[in-house]
Image (cartoon, grey):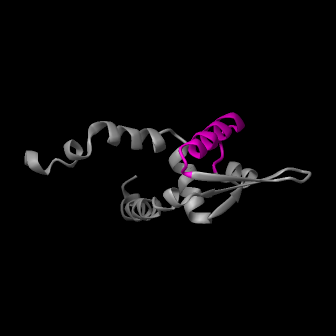
Amino acid sequence: MMKKENCYLETMGYERFEHVFKLLGEKWKLRITYMLALHEVLRYGELKRLLHPVTHKMLAQQLKELENDQLILRKEYPQIPPKVEYALTPMGRDLEPVVQALTEWINHYQTLS
């Protein structure tokens, strides 16, 4: 049993903990972050293909929310046809060790399924 003085959740604050889960906890947000951490820059169509079967509406919504939360950058090029690229912001890049740890955990325990 964890001693009360060692409870990180209590020290950090439950609201802050929940805020982080809101940032990444929706179905596609962690997947988007994961793909951008692996590929650095992806165009919208590439993301959609990598995240199949995500719908256009859901991907657009999740990208907009991640951009508003300052985890990803959206760069639009003024050309025809339109070209839009997505990349992680410095704050988003700071999640790369989490993505790496998650990848290692999945690889370690993939035989369980």
Residue 48 drawn at (x, y percent) = 69, 48
Nearer to the camera, 62 or 106: 62
Q: Is residue 107 left or right of residue 56?
A: left
Q: Is residue 70 left or right of residue 12?
A: right
- The mark tally for this picture is 0
**Residue lying at the far right of the rendered structure:** 80
Q: Is residue 24 left or right of residue 40?
A: left
Residue 54 drawn at (x, y percent) = 65, 41
Instruction: State whether residue 55 appears in this view.
Output: yes
Let me know if residue 68 is in the magenta part.
Answer: yes
Quarter assignment of residue 61: top right
* Residue at (71, 38) in percent of width and height: 56
* Residue at (44, 65) in percent of width and height: 100
Let me know if residue 112 is in the magenta part.
Answer: no
Q: Main secondary structure of the magenta part?
A: helix
Quarter assignment of residue 9: top left
Instruction: State whether residue 1 appears in this view.
Output: no
* Residue at (66, 62) in percent of width and height: 41
Quarter assignment of residue 111: bottom left
Residue 105 drawn at (x, y percent) = 37, 61
Residue 2 drawn at (x, y percent) = 10, 48
**Residue lying at the far top of the rendered structure:** 57
Magenta stretch, residue numbers: 51-71
Above or below — where is 5 with respect to 94? above
Nearer to the camera, 80 or 108: 80
Nearer to the camera, 106 or 47: 47
